[in-house]
Image (tube, rainbow, N blue to C red):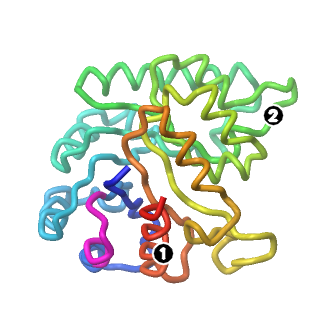
């Protein structure tokens, strides 16, 4: 684990992008992960990445874009030099209410995998917390997704697994063979960092990243991506987080 990435969503409230890229280069990052807002002019984003010696090996694309505008996704990913494409979220009003619905969603991800893997990309799902909350029948949406989508990779967002009430070590043990990327973020102690939605800089919260890093060594994970959903100071987050993981 040497090349650390940074989810650019973490700096969405600190424009412009070029300033963010300069900050990341200065703090020792060599990779970033893209999301929708940086794809508007992919060629300009690529030029900015090149200017700061950064690459974008992975990116997030919405399920709508993935299913309805395949060529657009492929053009963006190709322009930016991506190797891995992840579906990052499912809006509240689109989330299934029962096991059959989640299985059907898994089948949609499996179909997307067929499209993007054929084009040479790793394709997977990035979790939040809602996939780990049991349905009325006791089934777990994330398990239903995996069962219905045997081929997809997993970008494991560890902190969201914990917030969903699940044990990340058990999920790594059971499904680690799928993990190609990990979101590295931390959860503040109860009642702290309320202005940052209860998140923390990596190493300054309650998540045992040293033990998790050790557990992840037996998986095919390639990308370790720093993320904070709402930092009050993105450079503080970027600087302190990379220092923490580099010390492991």
Instruction: Determine whether label 2 and label 1 are within 8 Å by CB.
Output: no
- Residue appearing at x 43%, y 67% in the figure: 242
Judging depth in this view, the residue of 107 and 51 nearest the camera is 51
Residue sitting farthest toward the front: 248
Give the mark toward the camera: 2 or 1.
1
Q: Residue at x 13, y 63 (%)?
A: 50
Identify the magenta region.
23-31
| Residue that numbered label 2 is attached to | 134
Q: Is residue 142 above or below residue 4?
A: above
Label 2: state its secondary structure.
Answer: loop
- Secondary structure state at the residue bearing disc 1: helix
86 is within the stretch colored magenta = no
Residue 29, magenta (yes or no): yes
Quarter of the image for residue 19 reads bottom left
Q: Residue at x 38, y 35 (%)?
A: 66
Q: Does residue 176 appear left or right of residue 21 in this picture?
A: right
| Residue 123 spot, x, y in % from top left | 38, 31
Label 2 Cα crowd, 10 Å radius (few <14 / some 14-19 / many 20+): some
Q: Is 98 placed left or right of 104 in the picture? A: right
Of the numbered discs 2 and 1, the one sitting upstream in the chain is 2
On the image, the x and y values in percent for residue 88 come to 49, 45
Disc on res. 240: 1
Is 173 placed above or below 241 here? Answer: above
> In which image quadrant can residue 198 be found?
bottom right
Residue that appears at 31% across and 61% down: 38
Q: Is residue 173 above or below residue 87?
A: above
Q: Nearer the viewer, residue 183 or 106?
A: 183
């Amino acid at each position: 684990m040497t090349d650390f990435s940074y989810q650019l969503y973490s700096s969405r409230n600190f424009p412009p992008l070029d300033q963010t890229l300069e900050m990341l280069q200065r703090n020792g990052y060599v990779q970033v992960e893209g999301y929708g807002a940086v794809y508007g002019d992919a060629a300009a984003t690529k030029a900015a990445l090149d200017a700061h010696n950064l690459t974008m090996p992975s990116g997030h694309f919405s399920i709508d874009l993935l299913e309805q505008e395949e060529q657009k996704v492929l053009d963006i990913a190709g322009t930016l030099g991506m190797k891995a494409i992840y579906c990052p979220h499912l809006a509240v009003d689109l989330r299934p209410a029962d096991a059959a619905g989640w299985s059907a969603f898994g089948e949609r991800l499996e179909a997307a995998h067929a499209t993007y893997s054929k084009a040479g990309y790793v394709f997977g799902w990035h979790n939040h917390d809602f996939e780990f909350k049991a349905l009325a029948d006791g089934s777990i949406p994330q398990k239903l997704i995996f069962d219905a989508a045997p081929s997809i990779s997993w970008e494991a967002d560890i902190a969201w697994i914990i917030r969903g009430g699940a044990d990340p070590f058990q999920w790594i043990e059971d499904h680690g063979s799928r993990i190609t990327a990990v979101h590295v973020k931390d959860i503040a102690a109860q009642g702290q960092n309320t202005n940052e939605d209860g998140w923390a800089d990596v190493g300054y919260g309650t998540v045992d990243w040293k033990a998790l890093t050790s557990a992840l060594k037996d998986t095919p994970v390639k990308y370790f991506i720093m993320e904070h959903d709402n930092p009050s100071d993105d450079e503080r987050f970027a600087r302190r987080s990379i220092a923490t993981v580099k010390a492991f």
